[in-house]
Image (tube, rainbow, N blue to C red):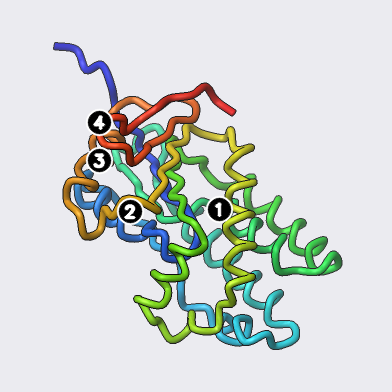
Amino acid sequence: MAKLFELPRYIAVEGPIRVGKSTLARILGERLAAQRVVEPEDNPFLKAFYEGEPGAAFQTQFAFLIRRFEQLRDLDLGAHSNKTVVSDYIFEKDKLFACLNLNDQELDTYNRYFNYFREQLPTPDLVIYLQATPEVLKKRLKKKNAAGEKAISEDYLMEVVKAYEHFFFHYTQSDLLIVNTSEIDFVDRNEDLQELLKKVSAPIKGTQYFLPLGSQDAAGAGGV
């Protein structure tokens, strides 16, 4: 019997801090026997940025930009490759944070490098955007209690959530699955995980939504 649907070869999972993107990317990577691309965390300027030191935002952003570019540039996704790749970020997320944290002069310099780097990188076939309210994310931050995240303010967290919402409302570069994680827990509840994996295993075209409403778990919409 002919194969009616082929899974995307390049899947990226995105969303604000503590929304569960790394966990979902790891699970998908294991299920698909895929190459994993893990968000770089070894940024020597990040702690200073969270603590509000002058100049740390620009240093932090540039360090992330270069590291993310190097990771995604090295992906083997050519026509002769059979690899599947699962990443827990998209390159554009770097610019999202740059717009939040840099002043106009810094952003002008940053954009020149961002545009040059972006032209050299592949675009995901499917992006899975994980949503959650600032209140839920704040609880998860407190539960995780990671040392480098203790200085994240509630105001900054709200700004990040709003920036993600705005970005993905206008996103059209690839097929997009939007998942509201505020009422589901695919980390600790296996039934939520299985429903989400079932949705990801089906064809996704344009923008679609996974809604935690029991049997009414998915609704589709045309591309935005």
Query: Considering only order in the chain, which callout, 3 or 1, is on the residue closer to the N terminus?
Result: 1
- Residue shown at 35%/47% (left/top)? 85
| The label number, if any, that marks residue 197 in the structure image | 3
> Residue 88 versus residue 82: which sits nearer the camera?
88
Mark 1 residue element: loop
Distance CA(mark 2)–CA(mark 1): 15 Å
Query: Considering only order in the chain, which callout, 4 or 3, is on the residue closer to the N terminus?
Result: 3
Mark 4 residue element: loop
Up the image or down, 45 lies above or below 186; here it is below
| The label number, if any, that marks residue 25 in the structure image | 2
Up the image or down, 23 lies above or below 31; here it is below
- Residue shown at 45%/40% (left/top)? 178
Quadrant of res 7: top left
Question: Which image quadrant: the N terminus?
Answer: top left
> Residue 115 versus residue 172: which sits nearer the camera?
172
Q: Mark 4 against mark 1, which lies toward the viewer?
A: 4
| Label 1 packing within 10 angstroms: few (<14), some (14-19), many (20+) | many
Label pair 3/2, CB-CB below 8 angstroms? no
Label pair 2/4, CB-CB below 8 angstroms? no
Query: Considering only order in the chain, which callout, 2 or 3, is on the residue closer to the N terminus?
Result: 2
Which residue lies under the disc numbered 1?
91
Query: Considering only order in the chain, which callout, 1 or 4, is on the residue closer to the N terminus?
Result: 1
| The label number, if any, that marks residue 215 in the structure image | 4
Distance CA(mark 3)–CA(mark 4): 15 Å
